[in-house]
Image (cartoon, helix red, strand yellow):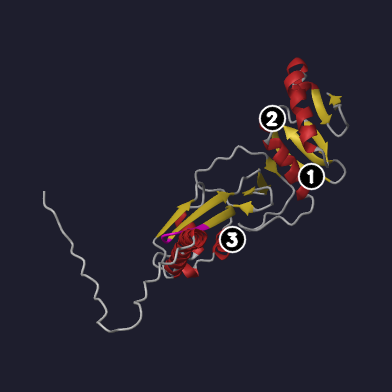
Amino acid sequence: MSKFIYDTPEPELPESGAQGVMPSPEPPKKRSRKGKAKGKGKGDFLKGLMYPAALLLLVAASLAASWLLQGHSVVQQIEVHAPGFTSAEQVLAQSGLTQGMSADGVRPLEVQERIDALPWVAESRVRLLPGGRVLVDVRERNPLALLVSGSRTMLVDAEGMALRIPAGYMPDLPLLYGFSLPEHGNRLQAPEFEALSEFLQALQQAPVAGMKISEVGWHPEEGVIALSRENAVRLVFGAGDFPEKVDRWEQFYRQLAPVKGMAAFTRLDFRFRNQVVALQS
């Protein structure tokens, strides 16, 4: 084992003849434990504040970087979801969106307004996602009836929008008479169509009742009228409460028609609450 010896120098003695006594060194001052503890607490408190501050700075820097990247990014990908009669190519051409355009130039509401101008489009939704990705979702119109005027035929939806029948499409819908056909993409202006639209929508919610009606029209005194597919019985529905009236027509067809047969009736009136006024042949 090695031993280390540290020699301390001997203190110099005062020279002979010097007067006075060499002052003794002052004892070291004792540190206040209270002050030390207090100082340590402040340091820990400040250190504790540094971490949240650093985290906030990091988040702010990330948001700023994301904002800058978004502001200077371009459209990299465009996805169009348009099932139905409107092709994705039509939607894309109408939208004005192109790959490579600045993301700052994409205004979703303006793009939606352009797409919604397509006749078959009922509603569109445009979303701009990070990384220059644009999603376009399209919901098409739902035809309720076939507008018939002479030899011309067009589809019509709940808003009265007239639509050309697409090639190869064979709709099984009631025929609607008594209106002039507007151009493709224009709406019916007849005020009585509002009641007819409500009736046709109620009819679509009752599959059996809808299948058993062949024609629909408007009468100035009787309101909505229709003809049954079997024996062309005149059906009178009036001008309101169509879900209830359509339900009564379906119950009648399910319960009474199989017993007596539709040939036994010439007219059925559903305008009266909780009853059906039948005129027999």
Q: Residues within 10 Å of mark 2 (few under 14, many from 20)?
A: some
Three-letter code for the amino acid on which mark 3 is drawn = Ala
Q: Is residue 107 magenta?
A: no
**Residue 81 falls left or right of residue 219:** left
Residue drawn 58% across and 40% down?
171
Q: Can you say whether 64 is above or below 161 in the image?
A: below
Residue nearest the observer in this picture, 20 or 217: 20
Tell me the element at label 1.
Answer: strand
**Residue 167 falls left or right of residue 264:** left
> In x, y percent, where is residue 202?
72, 38
> In x, y percent, where is residue 157?
65, 48
> According to the image, label 1 marks what residue?
218
Residue drawn 76% across and 37% down?
226
CA distance separating discs 3 and 1: 29 Å
Q: Which one is earlier in the sequence, the residue at label 3 or at label 2?
A: 3
**Residue 192 falls left or right of residue 143:** right
> According to the image, label 3 marks what residue?
117
Q: How many marks?
A: 3
Residues under numbered marks 3 and 2 in contact, where contact means CB atoms less than 8 Å apart: no
Residue nearest the observer in this picture, 123 or 100: 100
Q: What is the quadrant of residue 235 in the picture?
A: top right
> According to the image, label 2 marks what residue?
212
Q: Residues within 10 Å of mark 3 (few under 14, many from 20)?
A: some
> In x, y percent, where is residue 196?
75, 45
Q: Which one is earlier in the sequence, the residue at label 2 or at label 1?
A: 2
Q: Can you say whether 184 is above or below 142 in the image?
A: below
